[in-house]
Amino acid sequence: MSKVTEIINDFGERIIQVDGEIPVDLPTKNGDRFLFISHDQSFLTHGIHKYPAKFFPELPRWLIKRFSQERDVILDPFVGSGTTNVEALLSKRNSVGIDVDPFSRFIAKVKVTPLSEKALKDSQKSLLESILNYDSTEVNETDFPNFPYRDNWFNKEILLELTYLRNKIQQLMTNDDIKDFFKVCLSSIIRSVSNADDNCTRTVIRKKLNKLVKPTDALNRFAKTVLTKVPKMVAFSQNYPLDINVEFPDDMDARNIVYEKGHFDLAVTSPPYVNAVDYPRTHQLEMYWLEFAQDSLTDLKKQNVGTESVSSRDYKQKHQIGVQEADKVITNIYEIDPRRAYIAYKYLEDMRKNLAEVYKVLRNGCRYIVVVGNNRIRGQLFESWKYLMSIAEEIGFEVETYFGSEIIKHFIKVPREERINTDWILVLKK
Ligand SMILES: C[S@@+](CC[C@H](N)C(=O)[O-])C[C@H]1O[C@@H](n2cnc3c(N)ncnc32)[C@H](O)[C@@H]1O
């Protein structure tokens, strides 16, 4: 069901509002701005774990149906939690998801792996019984994971409960796919039972919040999450099409895509924003508990497009990208903050590598769809989407169309100068 209406926002701008499913043939003109209202962001496995800057499912669903055919192969080179792959699968397309972050690949894999209902329910029963029979003396403190500031992030009772649950998942008499599903359920409650702020993309403790975490919170939350997520996984598994392949290659980078030329029929992605989310830092606690990291996250951070982990050697001199508008802004930032100027430059340089790689692995006549927003860096408006269009053209793409998708949480009355409320959808054709 969908409803398309035109509205005028508080700034007198024309916005096309689409409620629910996006019609496959929705007309799009350069510069159009849409307000897509998602009706179910936790449909099937979509909601089993939070992820920053996640797609709402209707968007990749629409793009996939509009620009590809059944059995085609779809690529998402910055896959995050795998929304594109879940949607590709449900639309009977094969897909590949690339991400440098092993935690993201883990969530994405669980979201596309069907499970037997009986095996799931047996394991659920066993875990719920373990919760009812919780006995903290069963937990050996040497089983606590070791990571920096652990005892600041978590209270002792919670460390005991989380370790108990982790052990019980590990001891389930079942296959690894089912264990992985329950590990994702466990991961999904970790932030809420830590002392860190639940609602911040960075993992930080805010004393002012006076967050209260009580003994049994981890056990109760885990039980609750399992009871909501198992039915979603069962429903997903019943909708699972046979003979569709999904891959999340290890050790691949969006800047070096090791697939043969012309392998893909469509690529859809939302790359990181420059200077915005520090992904490894966002889910550091979850990574420590699931043993994807032990101490420093610096190596992983450095691999991230948009990284802030740069060395002072890098910004001794000003770097330019060769796109006039971008270089003007980079120069302005350099005068105030050479480090931030380098971060911005490097972001575009990394995205240039990604655009060239995707160009290579796409079949002729096929599309790369990039969903990207703007930022403000040191007060300067950094219009990534415009610069990326110029770079894409240099590489050989034709910009078929570009249109905006309003970001709802910013759809409020704030001065024009401060508003960064639109993600831009670039349809690039090889
Ligand atoms: C905006 S998120 C993608 C969210 C995704 N659309 C979803 O629905 O979950 C961007 C992702 O890019 C990943 N990333 C950053 N640098 C990368 C690189 N060099 N190669 C591959 N992935 C990278 C980050 O780890 C993050 O998961």
Image: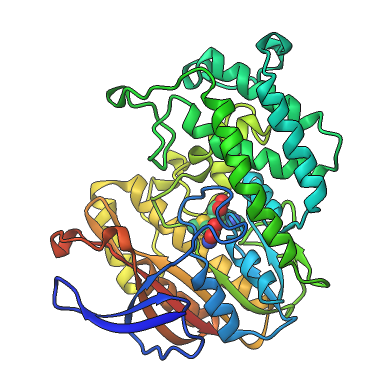
Q: Can you see residue 6? A: yes
Relative to 198, is 181 on the left or the right?
right
Instruction: Specify how the rendered protein is coloured.
Output: rainbow
Residue drawn at the location 59% of the way across and 22% of the way down: 147
Relative to 121, is 107 on the left or the right?
left
Residue 412 x %, y %: 20, 61
Q: In this view, does 199 lie above or below 243?
A: above
Q: How many labels does the image show?
A: 0
Q: Can you see residue 14? A: no
Residue drawn at the location 79% of the way across and 68% of the way down: 245
State the residue lying farthest toward the top.
137
Residue 103 x %, y %: 63, 44
Residue 121 x %, y %: 76, 44
In terms of image quarters, where does ligand 1 lie? bottom right
Residue drawn at the location 58% of the way across and 62% of the way down: 83
Q: Nearer the viewer, residue 121 or 393?
A: 121
Relative to 133, is 7 on the left or the right?
left
Residue drawn at the location 30% of the way across and 72% of the way down: 325
Place residue 223 in its image quadrant: top right
Q: Is residue 240 above or below residue 274?
A: below
Q: In this view, does 189 lie above or below 355?
A: above
Place residue 126 in its image quadrant: top right
Residue 290 x %, y %: 67, 34
Q: Is residue 245 above or below residue 203?
A: below
Q: Which of 290 and 135 is in front in this view?
A: 135
Q: In which quarter of the image is the C terminus?
A: bottom right
